[in-house]
Image: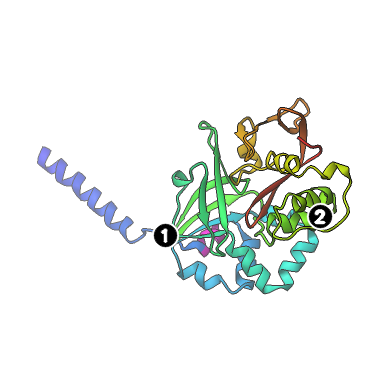
Amino acid sequence: MWRFVLLLVLGVIASSNAGNYGQVRRQGNIAEVLSEGGFSTLLQLVERAGLAESAAEGGPFTIFAPTDEAFAALDPALRNFLLTDVEALTTALLYHVVPGSVVGSALEDDLELGSATGSVLKVNVVGSNPREVTVNGVRVQKADLTASNGVVHVIEKVLLPPKLTIVEALAGDGRFSTLVTAISLADLFETLDSGTVDSFLQDIPAIRKGLLRLVLPSRLYSRALLGKTFRSVSGEELSVFQDNYSRLRIRSSINTATIINTDATLFNGVVHAIDSVI
């Protein structure tokens, strides 16, 4: 009797497995995973840039995939530019791609990943429970959408590839004209600026020391700064905190400033604008 029951159970299991075996679902490629996840804008842009075949058959790749909402939040002028300039669009998309498969558990604090454009993506991890992962300061909303040719991590904003160095970016922004002149006088440019400056800018050693107080020897995005103390290139301790008005502030031994713009990604680092000298 027991032998009969055992054989009957084994027969049922075998029959069930045989039925399911033919229905085993093939793991989708990156393009299919993005389609199933509702990344319609990203897929349209991938198609427009001529990268659809790579997404389906290439790899393995790690994709930091912006949501449709992330693309909708882009400045309209920038969005239109990307739609009309295929080369710029291709560069922007490849900036979200890392060769190889980097799963969520491998995204560690201070990890630097080389994107398919050659530019670096900086990963930071804040906390442990919950664990918040960012790439170039942008939060990873969901990790590990696994594909047959890689892995997809969902991010909340579009990553913009750098076009300028820090010096070039500062020189092109009128808000930093005094800073640019000070850098020139301190011989931190390759060539010196010959413009006229006031007496404040005549003490070159003091200028150099003051400038180096503003520089941290690492690529640090705002989420990685908050609640920590760092030592600048000049040796000064700088601490970053959030005040009662939810403003991000930075404190040195001589002053406290508010960080008014964050996370400008450039070829050789990241810039945060502050409202006063520290």
Image quadrant where one finds the N terminus: top left
**Visible in this render: residue 1?**
no
The one nearer the camera, 108 or 189, is 189
The one nearer the camera, 232 or 58, is 232
The reply, left or right, for residue 118 in relation to residue 166 is left
Give the image location of residue 39, x and y in percent: 61, 58
Q: Amino acid at mark 1?
A: Gln
Main secondary structure type of the part rendered in magenta? helix
Image quadrant where one finds the C terminus: top right
Residue span colored magenta? 31-37
Q: Which corner quadrant of the image does residue 262 belong to?
A: top right
Give the crowd class for mark 1: few <14, some 14-19, many >=20 residues within 10 Å: few
Q: Which residue is mark 1?
A: 27
The reply, left or right, for residue 130 in relation to residue 177 is left
Give the crowd class for mark 2: few <14, some 14-19, many >=20 residues within 10 Å: few
Residue 34 highlighted magenta (yes or no): yes
Please identify the residue farthest to the top as the structure is shown: 244
Residue 181 highlighted magenta (yes or no): no
Rendered position, 78 above or below 242: below
Name which residue lies at 18% across and 46% down. 8
The one nearer the camera, 187 or 172, is 187
Callout 1: SS = loop
Name which residue lies at 54% across and 60% down. 115
Q: Which mark is residue 173?
A: 2
Q: Amino acid at mark 2?
A: Asp
Given this view, does label 2 or label 1 mark the residue nearer the observer?
Answer: 2
The reply, left or right, for residue 22 in relation to residue 48 is left
